[in-house]
Image (cartoon, helix red, strand yellow):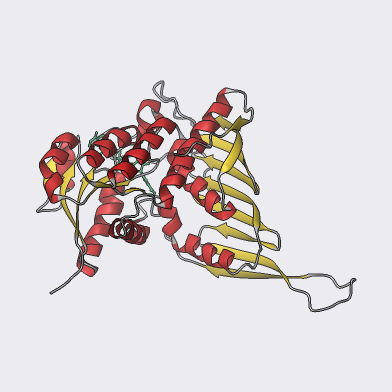
Amino acid sequence: MSNIRVLNGAIIGFGFISSKGHMPAYQDRMKQVGDVKIIAICDICFERKMQIPNGIRFYSDYVELIKNEYMNLDFVDISTHPADHFKIAKLAIEFGLNVLCEKPLTISIDESRDLIQLAIQSRKVLFPCHNYKFSPVISSVREILKSKKIGNVHAVTIQTFRNTHGIGTEEWIPNWRRIKDLSGGGIAMDHGSHSLYLAFEWLNSFPKTVNASSQNFSSDKSDKYDTEDNFSAVYEFENGIANIYLSWTAGVRKVIYTIQGEKGAITVEDDQIQTSFMIPSVSNNINHKAEWKTITSIAPSEWMDSGHKTWFNSMFDEFKKTIVENNFQNPELVNAYYCVQSILKAYESIDNNSSKVKFENNFL
Ligand SMILES: NC(=O)c1ccc[n+]([C@@H]2O[C@H](COP(=O)([O-])OP(=O)(O)OC[C@H]3O[C@@H](n4cnc5c(N)ncnc54)[C@H](O)[C@@H]3O)[C@@H](O)[C@H]2O)c1
């Protein structure tokens, strides 16, 4: 008899990311590992029911799904627009469920703090989808940093270029990312978490201050659009600095990261990683010039697939491990909290002529 623990789940919000990324990954996992089963799906758009695989129960109200199904479930996967994450996650935790939640965790600092406190007090796992951490290219960077080739990191630059904002499923509100009441903000709220949790990992700390600015360059200027499409911020950490630039109008889809250490640097351009580092000197001659070496490697990461299906199951492994180990205070919670705080403090700076804004250190 198999002793694999099968986790029963429900997806709430069956739009782009859950139908193109999460669900296909769950289906692969069910076939290959057999440790997850999606038994119910909720979407407020009844038309999305047509996209649901056979044998899965459909709800158009998340409250009804949670109240009817909580006895059959181990977790819910929240994949709605950000403004609804808090209320859905809160109800799920109150009904005794673990929660996997798309980024950003919430759209306010208070909501993030309240939700994290509720999860810890209720002894339930709350786990943000910080999926870039699980991409092959970021895993390779992690290995290079562990090798100490570039020494301690003191600066990172994180640039994400896109041709457009992400377009949601056409049956709902495809341009919700441009409407603040639904998204909580523009590209900083949408993509900022990915840049920030990578910065936290590489600098091995959290920011203390931020100066930020934003612009709106889209030619597509509906009166209803009130979110930024270009964002630039400098975050000061105790041990370094992070410079983040995000654009939905860059004319190209690409990421370029640099991680700068005391003995070298790593440069990432999509799948390509270049590591430049100083070769330790064997000479005692003070005139001996340090030699540098550059190694280039490729970590195919399917960056062009914005559903990131291939990264999902490594992240789900971590979510499952966190449940199995009852790790209710998992480190991703602090990361999620600081992501939300970093985005909102940057907006505060933008509202105050890009002046420097200090962080609150009151995590819990
Ligand atoms: N981690 C990543 O790489 C990544 C990539 C894309 C999107 N996302 C995140 O996924 C989430 C969804 O983004 P998307 O692009 O899939 O958007 P989407 O618009 O395609 O999907 C959202 C779905 O939620 C449904 N919905 C809205 N409110 C609901 C409610 N109260 N109850 C049930 N269903 C509801 C909508 O009808 C829609 O089908 C966002 O938080 C976004 O930031 C993450």
**Above-or-below relation of 17 to 83:** below
Number of numbered discs visible in the structure rendering: 0
**Above-or-below relation of 191 to 8:** above
At x 35%, y 51%, the residue is: 307
Does the image show residue 29?
yes
Q: Residue furthest top?
A: 223
**Above-or-below relation of 305 to 172:** below
Q: Position of residue 184 (x, y in %)?
A: 41, 30
**Above-or-below relation of 12 to 1:** above
Q: Residue 16 sits in which quadrant?
A: top left
Q: Nearer the viewer, residue 322 or 189?
A: 322
Q: Position of residue 199 (x, y in %)?
A: 55, 49
At x 51%, y 57%, the residue is: 270
At x 51%, y 66%, the residue is: 140
Does the image show residue 108?
no
Q: Nearer the viewer, residue 161 or 156?
A: 156
Which quarter holds ligand 1? top left
Quick one: quadrant of the N terminus? bottom left
Q: Nearer the viewer, residue 57 or 205?
A: 205
Q: Residue furthest bottom?
A: 282
Q: Position of residue 56 (x, y in %)?
A: 12, 50
Q: Residue 308 sits in which quadrant?
A: bottom left
Q: Position of residue 245 (x, y in %)?
A: 57, 42
Quick one: quadrant of the C terminus? top left
